[in-house]
Image (tube, rainbow, N blue to C red):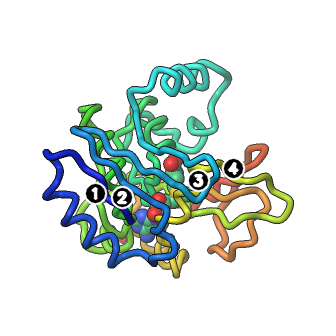
């Protein structure tokens, strides 16, 4: 992975280059670059004819207008999934933080976990600019976090990486890039089972409608046109 930086970030970028190149396969990283420029971090994916530049910006006007519009409409699926307003949510698979940012905008108290070092960098830099309370992240594996943390949550949310489905449209370039730099969970059910023990309310696992994954049978499913939200009742208070 190429790391390009201004003078302010030089030390950080040398360290990061060593770490990242030990994480990722060279074939994957050959066309990926991270650019540090003062407070901004961008990921460039040159696997495409027109390279794509990716960064996370929660201050983006268009993004915030879209969220406003979504929340002004009829009852949102997130209202159904997370009925206790203002409660705590642990997002075990933060990614670009899109779902979490919507939930934060709806007033929930959000903690995110992300295990990809590149995604964590982008997300962390976006959070620093936002300075929003009750919206934080940790870098690491959420299974380890749940196992060792004393915290418990009303809701635990999991959005594993979708495998491409037969007949489905192509993912966006951002999601394709995310696939290159993220790590797949080898045992999804272990994470779900542990999350059930640490949640007071519900564990919610997002999947595409026609997913072929073999995840634990949910207590029930809340459906939208394209997605299934698998819901498991949390048992934290019972143990
Ligand atoms: C499909 S993306 C999530 C997208 C996210 N919901 C959003 O709105 O942007 C899945 C993300 O979870 C991360 N991930 C997968 N398993 C994880 C785990 N066990 N612990 C922490 N992060 C994980 C991946 O690196 C990837 O960035």
Q: Nearer the viewer, residue 234 or 137?
A: 137
Kindly indicate whether the residue at mark 2 contacts the one at mark 1 (C-beta within 8 angstroms): yes
The image's mark for residue 138 is: 1
Q: Nearer the viewer, mark 4 or mark 2?
A: 2
Which class describes the residues within 10 Å of circle 2: few (<14), some (14-19), or many (20+)?
A: many
Q: Decide if residue 238 is in sight here.
A: no
Going 38% across and 45% down the picture, which residue do you hit?
A: 42
Residue 46, percent across and down? 54, 55
Label 3 sits on residue = 175
The mark that comes first in sequence, 1 or 2, is: 2
The mark that comes first in sequence, 4 or 3, is: 3
Label 2 sits on residue = 113
Picture layout, residue 189 above or below residue 30: below
Q: Is residue 97 left or right of residue 207?
A: left
Q: Is residue 21 left or right of residue 63?
A: left
Q: CA distance from mark 2 to mark 3?
A: 18 Å
Q: CA distance from mark 4 to mark 1?
A: 28 Å
Q: Callout 1: helix, strand or loop? A: strand
Going 51% across and 54% down the picture, which residue do you hit?
A: 45
The mark that comes first in sequence, 2 or 3, is: 2
Q: CA distance from mark 1 to mark 2?
A: 5 Å
Picture layout, residue 26 above or below residue 206: below
Kindly indicate whether the residue at mark 3 contacts the one at mark 1 (C-beta within 8 angstroms): no
Residue 176, percent across and down? 60, 57
Q: Nearer the viewer, residue 201 or 66?
A: 66
Label 4 sits on residue = 222
Q: Nearer the viewer, mark 1 or mark 3?
A: 3
Q: Is mark 3 within 8 Å of ligand 1?
A: yes
Going 62% across and 54% down the picture, which residue do you hit?
A: 48
Q: Nearer the viewer, residue 168 or 27?
A: 27
Q: Is mark 2 within 8 Å of ligand 1?
A: yes
Q: Please count the marks in the image.
A: 4
């Amino acid at each position: 992975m190429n790391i390009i930086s201004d003078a302010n970030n030089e030390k950080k970028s040398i360290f990061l280059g060593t770490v990242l190149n030990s994480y990722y396969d060279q074939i994957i990283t050959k066309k990926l670059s991270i650019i540090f420029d003062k407070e901004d971090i961008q990921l460039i994916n040159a696997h495409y004819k027109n390279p794509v530049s990716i960064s996370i910006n929660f201050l983006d006007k268009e993004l915030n207008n879209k969220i406003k519009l979504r929340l002004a409409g009829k009852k949102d699926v997130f209202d159904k999934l997370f009925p206790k307003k203002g409660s705590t949510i642990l997002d075990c698979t933060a990614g670009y933080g899109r779902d979490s940012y919507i939930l934060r905008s709806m007033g929930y108290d959000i903690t995110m976990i992300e295990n990809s070092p590149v995604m964590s960098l982008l997300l962390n830099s976006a959070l620093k600019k936002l300075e929003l309370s009750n919206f934080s992240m940790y870098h690491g594996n959420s299974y380890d976090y749940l196992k060792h943390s004393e915290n418990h949550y009303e809701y635990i949310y999991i959005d594993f990486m979708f495998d491409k489905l037969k007949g489905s449209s192509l993912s966006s370039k951002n999601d394709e890039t995310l696939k290159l730099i993220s790590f797949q969970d080898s045992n999804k059910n272990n994470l779900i089972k542990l999350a059930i023990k640490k949640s007071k309310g519900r564990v919610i696992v997002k999947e595409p409608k026609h997913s072929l994954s073999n995840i634990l049978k949910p207590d029930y499913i809340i459906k939208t046109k394209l997605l299934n939200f698998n819901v498991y009742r949390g048992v934290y208070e019972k143990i």
